[in-house]
Amino acid sequence: MKTSFALPALFFVVTLAFTGICGQILSGSFEEDPNMMWYPNGPWDASGGTPEILQTYTHARSNPQVTINAVDGQNFVMLKTGGRTETTYYSQLTQVIDVNAGESITGVYFFATDDWLPVWNDFATIKLIPADPCSGLTEILLAYKDVNSVGSYNSMENWGRFSHAFDSNEAGTYVLTLRVEDVSDYKISSYLAVDALKIIEGPPEPWCTYKLAGDINNDCKVDFFDFAKMQENWLIDCGAMPEDEACVPR
């Protein structure tokens, strides 16, 4: 009798851990193959324009150019509007998550645009939408950027960070929604990059508001990971290999 109950119990625990219950975000650092993340039965549900997994991105139209690299691991996700078809006026990723009182959600995001004002104020949002509209929970806006906030053809200066601590009235099940959307057209691109999505115990750590000397991977810390990045690119000749990631202006 004991054995017959142990196996179902073990299966239940493993299932909870795999499906993202217990306050976890699956593939929150986007290190896996995209086919494992959103096609066909991954933890993320993609709609609109197809997301891309990148290691670095340069918004060449910003003046000066702005380059971002992954904050957590080697990769991040990029959502992109535009493409001259009606299905690409937006790009969106969603995942159902559970959060508990006393936990916090954290992550980093970056918005850039090729569009311009005053008409085409494209925007990006990161939201928590109650999975059950009758639950009594309310929508939580984690991050918002638009063309108006960065300027025509422009971008943020670097990764921005969002965080939210949950109290007892906010604990429950939400749809974590990452979305970038065109306004009034679907031709000119805007971009939302996201990385390092996590649910953590307690309040989030402080976040730096300025560039730290030696912070090579843009995670607002100078640590072993910066040293590893420096070692990986040691003695690269940018004259011979200007296209190398280490040689891109930052």
Image (cartoon, rainbow, N blue to C red):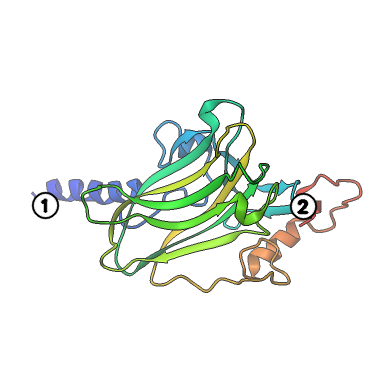
The image shows residue 209 at horizontal and vertical percentages of 62, 71
Residue at 68 percent across and 47 percent down: it is 57
Q: Earlier in the sequence, mark 1 or mark 2?
A: 1
Picture layout, residue 81 above or below residue 175 = above
Res 218 seen here: yes
Q: Amino acid at mark 2?
A: Gln
Residue at 80 percent across and 59 percent down: it is 234
The image shows residue 223 at horizontal and vertical percentages of 64, 70
Q: Is residue 249 left or right of residue 149?
A: right
Label 1: which secondary element: helix
Label 2: which secondary element: loop
- Label 2 neighbour load within 10 Å: few <14, some 14-19, many 20+: some
The image shows residue 33 at horizontal and vertical percentages of 53, 39
Relative to the observer, which residue lies in front, 1 or 166? 166
The residue labelled by disc 1 is 2
Q: Is residue 140 left or right of residue 189?
A: left
Relative to the observer, which residue lies in front, 247 or 89? 89
Between marks 1 and 2 in the image, the one whose residue lies nearer the viewer: 2
- Label 1 neighbour load within 10 Å: few <14, some 14-19, many 20+: few
Gap in angstroms between the C-alphas marked 1 and 2: 64 Å
Q: Amino acid at mark 1?
A: Lys
Please tell me the numbered disc located at residue 113. Answer: none
Residue at 25 percent across and 47 percent down: it is 132
The residue labelled by disc 2 is 65
